[in-house]
Image (cartoon, grey):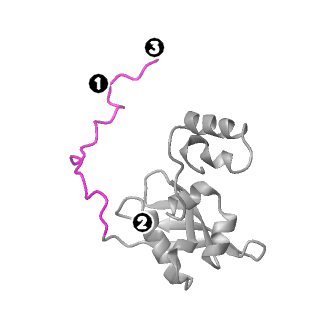
């Protein structure tokens, strides 16, 4: 008794005929974008609105964060789109849907006080530290040896 299915046996169906795969349009910027919010919360302690975003973008690639900031600023009547922070986006397998997080601050000053520095750098609200990590640490440790105005003179600047 043959335990294996033989390819030439009558029980095996012939391979399906399929059309050749054609490449569609890549990231078409004219596709529609729908934004849905979940778990919306007004956080009065930090003067912000926070929410989870579901971005539906069929027929195009992931939506740029700058575009999402503009859409959210218009939707929530924010005068300055620098007060809108979007981050943590993950595109679902197969595309067409991306989920992330959004924070909308009441004022730019609130955002500067609360947000971590790396997110301020991403939104062009702060400058990234210059120089290598090692040189910054060496300069910091060199400054520990001095007090007062001499500290500013070490390393050629007040960093």
Element marked by disc 3: loop
Does the magenta run of residues contain 141? no
- Disc 1: which residue: 8
Whole-number angstrom distance, CA of label 2 to CA of label 1: 46 Å
In the figure, residue 110 lies in which quadrant?
bottom right
Q: Is residue 63 above or below residue 92?
A: below
| Residue indicated by mark 2 | 57
Helix, strand or loop status at disc 1: loop
For the point 24% across and 44% down, the residue is: 17
* Image coordinates for residue 91, horizontal then vertical, percent: 49, 54
**SS at badge 2:** loop
Which is nearer the eye, 34 or 142?
142
First along the sequence among labels 2 and 1: 1
Mark 3 or mark 2: which comes first in sequence? Answer: 3
Which mark's residue is nearer the viewer, 2 or 1? 2
Residue at left 74%, top 71%? 46
């Amino acid at each position: 008794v043959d335990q294996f299915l033989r390819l030439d046996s009558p029980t095996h169906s012939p391979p399906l005929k399929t059309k050749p795969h054609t490449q569609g349009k890549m990231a078409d910027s004219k596709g529609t974008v729908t934004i849905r919010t979940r778990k919306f919360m007004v956080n009065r302690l930090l003067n912000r609105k926070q929410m989870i975003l579901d971005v539906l973008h069929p027929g195009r690639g992931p939506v740029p964060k700058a575009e999402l900031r503009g859409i959210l600023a218009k939707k929530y009547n924010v005068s300055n789109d620098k007060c809108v922070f979007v981050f943590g986006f993950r595109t679902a397998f197969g595309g067409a849907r991306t989920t992330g997080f959004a924070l909308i601050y009441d004022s730019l000053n609130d955002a500067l006080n609360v947000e971590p520095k790396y997110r301020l750098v991403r939104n062009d609200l702060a400058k990234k530290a210059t120089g290598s990590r090692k040189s910054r640490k060496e300069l910091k440790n060199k400054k520990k040896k001095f007090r007062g105005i001499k500290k500013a003179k070490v390393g050629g600047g007040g960093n």
